[in-house]
Image (cartoon, rainbow, N blue to C red):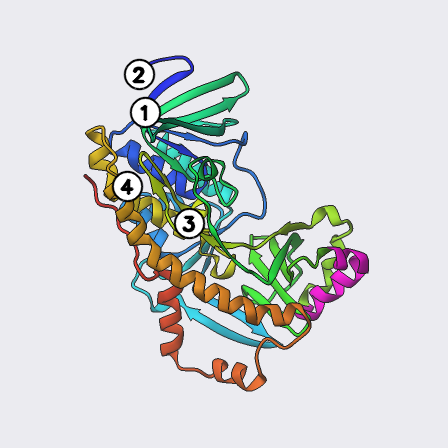
Amino acid sequence: MPSGNHVERDCVIAGGGPGGMVLGYLLARAGLKVTVLEKHADFFRDFRGDTVHPSTVTLLGELGLREKFLQLPLTKLSTMDAVFDGQRLTIADFRTLPAPDNFLVFAPQWDFLDFLAREAANYPNFELLMSTDAAGLIVEQGQVRGIKAIAADGGREIRATLTVAADGRASILRTAAGLVPDEFGVPIDVLWFGLPKPPDPPPVTLGYISSRGMVLTIDRGDRYQSGMVIRKGGLDELRAAGLDALRDRITYAAPFLHTVVGTLTDWDQIKLLSVQINRLRRWYRPGFIAIGDAAHAMSPMFGVGVNFAIQDAVALFNAIARDLAAGDAPVSKLAGVQRRREKPVKVMQLLQRNGHRAIARAATGSSVAPRWFVMVLRFSSPLLRRITARFIGIGIRPEHVRWP
């Protein structure tokens, strides 16, 4: 392999998130030369997706990594519960899924990514470049040939048979490839903040929904990664009302938090996530493909973003690994990856868009659903919870690793 600032690889991946890291691991394990670029110096950034679904735990099992993964600091959930105006409902019962992967996991994403990086580092043909930004594409005669990158020691070119954009919803490489997503209007945003867990907390609950808003409580051991759904563009109005008004809205939806909301003393503790749903009409061009949020930004609803990115990575690996070993990345194979992954994405995004309309009612002070509807859900049959568990936990088209 050439040294210096010009490197030849089988695949170069922009973005050290779950999709990029899983793809890099799989390709390296298959004997291919792969470089993953991560623009930050580490993976530690709060308020990232923590939800790891049963389908992903199954994939880790197929790779022999399941037990190591389950030793990380994480929380297992056997059910997905929410509270509607004081009424606790079980939305999904993961215990109905096939054992042993019949649970949902909340794992801090930085721990998950560090874990994947350690495992991938066992393969000498895997390279992870931290603090290295993907600045553009190398394009020759209409074919993408790699990435132009910028690091602390200067610029470099990483040439590769296949270039993968896994650099998120603000993807630089997607733009450089001339791919523009279709945007679907979203009526909500989410405020993220951390809260200590109060004494005698209730059972693990995904969210609390009331006529004054929706509060998320993602369990992280001794604290919550918390969020509150607000009207799109409504942050300035909330700030004008003051922190006391925000704390009141939080405790109205989730009264048990009244002893800890006082820890929110500054707006700097609160981060805005501008919720987006979008999708590329075409994910690829010769020598290039986008996956994960770079191809289809998902809403936080059901916490599917991490898992859809990983499913994309596995589908791409299955389709292209043998060709990459032969020095080729056929456009037909890239198109096939989009065809395979597009249906699950479209179905989930449609469900998310419909769900946002109901959640937006709470964000504007209206009831999410009539009380009779909530009561029907409360006493619905176990069959509904089984169906929901399969849809959320496993999905429409789960991917399984096929070694070339």
Q: CA distance from mark 2 to mark 3?
A: 34 Å
User: Dot 2: few (<14), some (14–19), or many (≥20) neighbours within 10 Å?
Assistant: few
Element class at badge 3? loop
**Residue identifier under label 1:** 9
Residue 79 is at least partly visible in this image: no
User: Mark 2 or mark 4: which comes first in sequence?
Assistant: 2
Residue matched to label 4: 317
Of callouts 3 and 4, the N-terminal one: 3
| Tag in front: 3 or 4 | 3
Magenta run includes residue 163: no
Q: Residue 280 — which label?
A: 3
Which of discs 2 and 3 lies nearer the camera? The answer is 3
- What amino acid type should be assigned to the residue bearing mark 4? Phe
Amino acid type at image mark 1: Arg
Marks 3/4: CA–CA distance? 20 Å
Residue in the image at 47% along x and 38% along y = 175
Q: Is residue 385 above or below residue 182?
A: below
When asked about the image quadrant of residue 205, the answer is bottom right
For marks 3 and 1, give the CA distance.
26 Å
Residue span colored magenta: 236-255
Near mark 3 (Cα within 10 A), the count class, few <14, some 14-19 or many ≥20, is many
Rendering coords of residue 79 (x, y %): 45, 67
